[in-house]
Each structure stands twice: as C-alpha cells, then as structure tokens.
Amino acid sequence: MKSFLVNPTTRLAGEIAVPGDKSISHRAVILASLAHGPTEVTGFLPSEDCLCTLRAFQALGVDIEVQDPRTLSIENRVHRLSPAREAIDCGNSGTMMRLIAGVLAGQPFRSRLLGDASLSRRPMGRIIEPLGRMGARIRAEGEKGTPPLALEPARLHGIEYELPVASAQVKSCLLLAGLTAEGMTRIVEPSPTRDHTERLLAHFGLRPLREGRAILVQGGLSLEARDLVIPGDFSSAAFWIAGAAAIRGSEVRILGVGLNPTRTGLLNVLLRMGAQIEESVVDAQGDGEPRGSLLIRGEKLRGTKIETGEIPNLIDELPVLAAIAALAEGETHIRGAEELRVKECDRIRCMVENLRRFGVPVDELPDGMIVEGGHPIRAARVRSFGDHRVAMACSILALRADGRSRIDDVECVDTSYPGFLRHLEKLSQTASPVATDWKDYLPWMQSRAERRALEGAPQFPVVAIDGPSASGKSTAAKALAQVLGIAYCNSGLVYRAITWSLIGKGLALDREMVFKTAVRQMKIECRIEENELHVQVDGKEPGEEARSPIVNAAVSRVAASSWLRERLLPIFRHLAEDRSLVMEGRDIGTAVFPATRFKFYIDADPKVRAQRRQNQGETDSIEERDWEDRSRAAAPLRRAADAVLLDSSEMTVEEVVRRMRDELRKRGFPVPEGASVP
Ligand code: DC
C-alpha cells in the first residue's frame, strides 16, 4: 500500500501544467475509434482509467499506437468494431463503462463489461433503462443493477428521453448509442452538464442539435477523423486552485488548462468565498474546448452555500471544496449532492470521516455536509477509501495541519493524476525558505526511520547524481565512487541493456503490448563486481553495443515507459541494500532514492555537451534526448529541490569531484580520511 506523507507548508507557489483532461481523453479515444481516417491525439492522459478505454478499443480491433504516453495515433481501418475476445475491463472507471456501453449496445455482437471492486458497486440501471428503451438488450449481472454487464447483439432506434438526474455520463452514453440507432435520439437534461461529447462530436464533423435543454443526434451518420489536442484537466487543476486560493500568501499559475464553462463551477464558488483568481482564456482550439491559464493568489476565504443547481458543474471538485471549507471563516453548506454517494466511494461519508480526523467540525447530511471552518487543523492519518479525489483533497488540507499527515492507500491517484505528489512537492517546496546549508533542511525532513519505511530509503548512504546527457556526470560519478571507495552504478546502462535486447529481437518498441510482453519475459540481472554495476539481459552483457547509434536513438523512448520504470525501481533500490554506492541517471534523486541526503545535479551548456559526445565519437542528438528525458510523464529529468547544482561547462572532472567530495563531507557523508582527488 502506498501512502503520501504531507508536510505542512506556509503557502503554495509556482507554475505548473496539469495532465490531460480525463473526460476528454476517454471520449477522444472512443470517437477517434469510430471515425473514418487517422486521428492523432496529443495531451492524452495516460492514467489507468483512460488506458482501460484505450485497451478496450484495441481489443475491439481499432489500431491505436502509443507514440509516447501522451500522444496516440488512432485509426479504425475496417470502419467497424470487431467483437473483443474477452470481457472488457473498465477498471475503476464509471465514465468508461457508461460510455462504452452506449457504443456497444447497438453492435451486431455480444460484449461483456467488467469493473474493479469499487466500480462493481456502482449503479448501471440509469443507462440500462434508457438503452433498453432504444432496443438494447443489457443484463446487469451484479445485484441491484451493478456490473458486470452482458450486452447482447441488438439494433437500436432513436428515442426521446428526459434524464431523471443531470449526468454527463448518461447523456453521453445515449448520444453514443444514438449514433448507431435508426432515426433521431433526443435527450433532455434537467440542467446543463459537461458537454465534451457534444463538442467532440462536432470536432469529428457531426454537430448535435441543441434545442433548449434538449440535444438531438441523428443516427447512421459517420464521423470524420481530425487531430485533437487535449487541454489540461480542470478537475486536476482544482486541487491547486482551491488550495492556493485558501492558503494566504500563495501564488500559483496553472497553464494550458481546460476552461470549459460546464466544468469550472468551482471558480464561481471560490470567487464568492473571496478568492483572487485571474483567468485568461488563450484559445479554443479546433475541438471547441476553451483553454487558458489561471493565476491564483491566496486569501482568507469566507464560508458559502453551494446549492443544488451548482452541483453538476463542480461535482468532481466537491471533495476539495469540502477540504478547503475547513480553512475558510464560518460555515460552508453543500446541499443537493447525493450523487456523491455513488462515486468511486461514498464521497460524503468518506470526506466527513476524514475531515473529522483532521479535527474539523462537520455535519453529515443525506445530500451533502456542513463544514465549520476556521478551526486549527490537526495532523492526521487518513485513508483514501480507494478514491483518487478523496486522497488528493485530503493532501491539500494536510498542507495546513499542525504536523506531518499521512494519506494511506493512494495508488488510486494515478487513475486521474499521475504525478500529483511531484506537483504537491514542487508547489509546496518552493514556498519553503531557501536553504543555504544542508542543516536548514532538517526541520522539514521526516525522521529517517519513517522515510526509510515509507519510501525505500537506502540502508547505506547513497550518493544520487542526476543530470542531462553528456553533462559529465558519468565520468564524475565514477571518479567520485573511486575517491570514496564505494560502488559506481550507471543506471542508464540498465535502460540501454534492455533497449539493446529488444532491438536484437527485432521488436517494435512502440507497440505497448509487444514491449511489455518482451520485457516481462526478460531476465534482467544487475550485479556489482569490482565496485561497478554490470547488467545482463537473458545471460548476456551488451558491452560496447550498449552505446551503439541504434541504441542511442531508441533508449529514451524505452526509458519513458512508466510501466518499465516501476519494475526497475526495486532492482535499483536492492543494489543499495548491502552497500553504499554512487548511482547516476535522470531520476536517482527524485524517484529512486528520494530520501537520500546526498544529491547532486550536474548540468552543462548544451553546446559543450554536444561537443563532448562528438569527442567520444558517439552519434547522439543531445537536444532531442534532453527533450525526451525532460518532457516524459514518467520520472522526467529534473533537479530535486535538495540537490546541489553543479554547472560543469567550465569545470574539469577533478574540480567537479572535489566539489562533490567537500559537499558530502559538509552533509555528513562518511568520506574516508585523506580521500584525495587524483
Ligand atoms: O545516461 P545515459 O545516456 O546512459 O542514459 C540512457 C538513457 O536512459 C537516457 O535517455 C535517459 C535514460 N535514463 C533514465 O531515464 N533514467 C535513468 N535513471 C538513467 C537513464
């Protein structure tokens, strides 16, 4: 079980771009899979939820290539869907199950939809009933209309349907079913809900008609493929918007975020509470989704009343709104939100329980809660209840607690916001006073025992060295290890050995399933011999070939796989279990050994680095590799906040090593007496 440890902070500050919009990512894959022609989707959210949708359409016969985790090429070459060989796994995603049910209800083949334990408790009656009226034959195999869902082949016809509850998922499900139905489907919403499906349908050339509260879609028309850029997810940005607005002195800028008015209800509520938010819509791209940036400055907020009519446009933001209501002066009433009881968890009950653990007085209501703000927040240990938004909302509140809090069971955060913790650290760390000496960091550090238990901190002191290609870090790291008399590990060698082996097998590196299967079957062995890391794949060492031009050209792409990186983490950490070492790479200080106290980041002017590669007689594009290493979603290259930055452009290797040795001494590393740099 993974946990977040959240330290209190005085304010949030900095600039970020949040990952791609979850709702739009699901819909983009679905509609591009139904369209004629190829679509390139950029800004895709590679979260577990959205990957389930991606895998489902691959299983239904659509060609989907993952170019990099956020860029997909989608093409349905046969202009129809084919039956999936197995049941379709919708994971934790209610959106996916409801949307894909709409697509599959009118197909000439059978399908079965499954979900995880939490999704298997969520009601599907609200789609089964209207789809049934359209002629679909769907059976819920669980109790009280819950998944799994068995869909029989059917021909659908359009209907007129008034939604009993405002729900974008149900509306979208019926619009999608309407595409395969005969005639017109007319859906009436009690109040407007997010309209991404309508905007995307228009993007793909099929504009649904709007008549007041009704939306009409004509069946049997085809969608035309068109490239798509997905904006940042407002619901992910919401944690920083609400957090920064409620923590006085904060200043956070969020870039490239979706500002679709059916999603930004939170902004109106925060403004009413006294928040300072500047919104600049930069453009609405071809897909008609407005996007832009937000600047939030922290203020003392006042409590407010959130009414039924406001709920649909801020439904996902209610957990974080409940959390920051605890920081506002006076009471905040949330009413008309019974929908929250059937989300990934019962968000009313779970948030009430967690708020109480933080010492916040709160009353639970059948359709919401009343939060009494302005009381001191106690550090607490709380659970996510398997719900990503509960985990993140509680992390925001924990920033204002009187000590370190712990949020348990946070794996679920990856369903919508991979990288949340990194952003939390970034925005709250910027706020810490700038440390001039190592000792200055100590008050913010957890006890070593705690960190070790929670983050796999090394038993023996580890020196972590990160930096871009050809920054001189390998040479310096190797020399430093010699000076210290400890092992030297080049973590890049592991990525290189894997790439070398994949290339040797003639495998297409960008076919995700092929790649995963090959890596799963690989025997990867890392050994330290004579104080240096040796890597064997299937019993063979790559030797010189690890640095061949073809490996150089492909290794960054392999290293960008978050799935692979997760598998390698324990292997890297294991190396430090029985010895001290110097390890160099891109994420050693940020992801592999984030708890070590001995971190360096070595950089150099890109021109100097390109020259160095040339001098080594290697073919490598520094610029491209930098971009790939820095922009990838999984453990991108960045300097850890507590790493010492060394610019080696005009330094000799000896100078770099000497600086590191002296800094290590200062930080309390056991540098051998008389360790001199040759
Ligand atoms: O350091 P190097 O050039 O040998 O690394 C090869 C590639 O592996 C490079 O593209 C970055 C990647 N890498 C990484 O992503 N994480 C590491 N810890 C080490 C290397």
Image: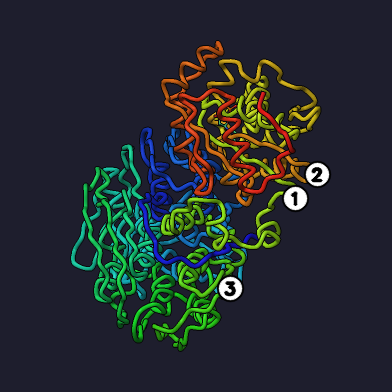
Give the quarter the ligand 1 occupies.
Answer: top right
Going 56% across and 53% down the picture, which residue do you hit? 111
- Callout 3 secondary element: strand
**Mark 1 closeness class: few <14, some 14–19, many ≥20 residues within 10 Å:** some
- On the image, the x and y values in percent for residue 282 come to 21, 48
Q: Earlier in the sequence, mark 2 or mark 1?
A: 1
Label 3 within 8 A of ligand 1 by Cβ? no
**What kind of colouring is applied to the model shown?**
rainbow
Left or right of 572 on screen, residue 357? left
Disc nearest the viewer among 3 and 2: 2
Query: What number of labels is visible?
Result: 3
Q: Image quadrant of residue 575? A: top right
Q: Amino acid at mark 2?
A: Asp
- Callout 1 secondary element: loop
Circles 2 and 1 in contact, beta carbons < 8 Å:
yes
Toward the front, the furthest residue is 674
